[in-house]
Image: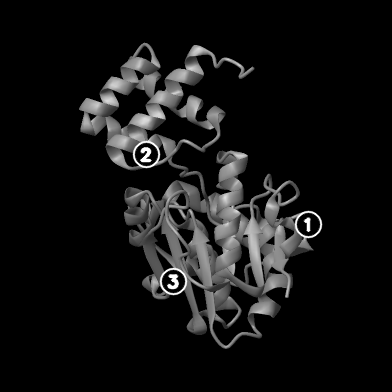
Amino acid sequence: MTPHKDNLDIEISLLLDAIYQKHGYDFRQYSQAHIARRVNNRMLITGLKNVTEVHAKVLHDETFAAELLRDLSITVTEMFRDPEFYKSLREKVIPILKTYPFIKIWHAGCSTGEEAYSMSIILKEEGLYDRATIYATDFNQQALNRAKQGIFSNELMKEYTLNYQLSGGKESFSKYYTSSYDNVIMHQSLGKNIVWANHNLVTDSVFAEVQMIFCRNVLIYFDRNLQNKVHSLFNASLIKGGILCLGSKESLRFNNAHTTYNELDSKHKIFKKKY
C-alpha cells in the first residue's frame, strides 16, 4: 500500500509542479527539506499564511515568482571556501593539470562566481592560466550577472583573505582586487578566461568535454535520483583521468558513478576518473 503524504508535502509538490509548468524551472527533485525551508522563509517575509497562498502568488504575481525562484536557487558560496580543500588542490591536482597542453574546467552551479575567481587566482599563481578556460555555469541569471561583474562586499575581504592565506596563496590577496567604497572589484584579468553561461543541471545536457569539474555543495540539495542523473552528466563530460571535486558533505559512496572514480583525496572529496 502506498503511504499517504501529509498536507505540507502535497502542497509543496503542487507548488513545484506549478513553478515548472508556469516558469520552466524544475525543482521537483530537490531535497524536500531545502525546498520547505526556502518556501517557509518566503512566507515569513511576505506574510503569507500557507503554501496554497504561495501557489496562487507564483501563478499570478511575476515579481513574487522571481523572488521565490531566487530563494530556491543555491547561492551560498565564498572565495577559497574550505581552505584545506584548495591547499590539497594545489598539491595533488595542479601537477596533473600541468600535464595537459590545454585545460578546460567546468564550475557547475557557480552561483555568484567566488569559486571561479578563486580558481583563476590559483591557475595564475601556478602558471596555467594562459592555457586554461573556465566554464562557470548556473541557471540563476541574476547570480551569473553578479558573477560577471566581479564585485563583492568589502566586508567579506577579511574572511576571503584569511581563506586565501590558509589555502597556500603565494601573493598578497589585495593584489587581485581594487577597493571602491563599500565594495571590491576583482581585476579584469581574472575573468579573461572565464566563460559565464546559463546551464541548468536538472534539465540541460552535457556542457563540454573537460579535464576538471567543480560542483561543490550543490548536490546536497538534490534527491538521490537527481544526484544520479547529474553524476551521469559529469561522467559524460569528464575525460578519462579527469578530476571531480565535490563539497565536504557530498560523497560518491551511494551513487551509481562511484565505480568509475578513484579517490585522489578522500577527506576533501577529490576524485579522479578511471582510465
- Please provide percent x and percent y for residue 26: 41, 41
Q: Residue furthest bottom?
A: 101
Classify mark 1: residues with Cα within 10 Å, few (<14), some (14-19) or many (20+): few
**Placement of the N terminus among the 4 image quadrants:** top right
> Are the residues flagged by discs 3 and 1 in contact, CB closer than 8 Å?
no
Earlier in the chain: of badge 2 and badge 3, it is: 2
Q: How far apart are marks 3 and 1 (CA)?
A: 29 Å
Give the quadrant of residue 38: top left
Q: Residue shown at 48%/84% (left/top)?
A: 130
Q: Which of marks 3 and 1 is in front?
A: 1
User: Which residue type does callout 2 highlight?
Assistant: Arg
- Please provide percent x and percent y for residue 213: 57, 64
Q: Is mark 1 on a helix, strand or loop?
A: loop
Asked whether residue 166 appears in the rendered view, the answer is: no
Q: Mark 1 points at which residue?
A: 266
Q: How many marks?
A: 3
Q: Residue shown at 58%/38% (left/top)?
A: 223
Q: How far apart are marks 1 and 2 (CA)?
A: 33 Å
Instruction: Residue 190: give its label.
Output: 3
Q: Mark 2 points at which residue?
A: 70
Position of residue 167 in the picture relative to residue 5 (left or right): right
Q: Distance between the residues labelled 2 and 3?
A: 26 Å
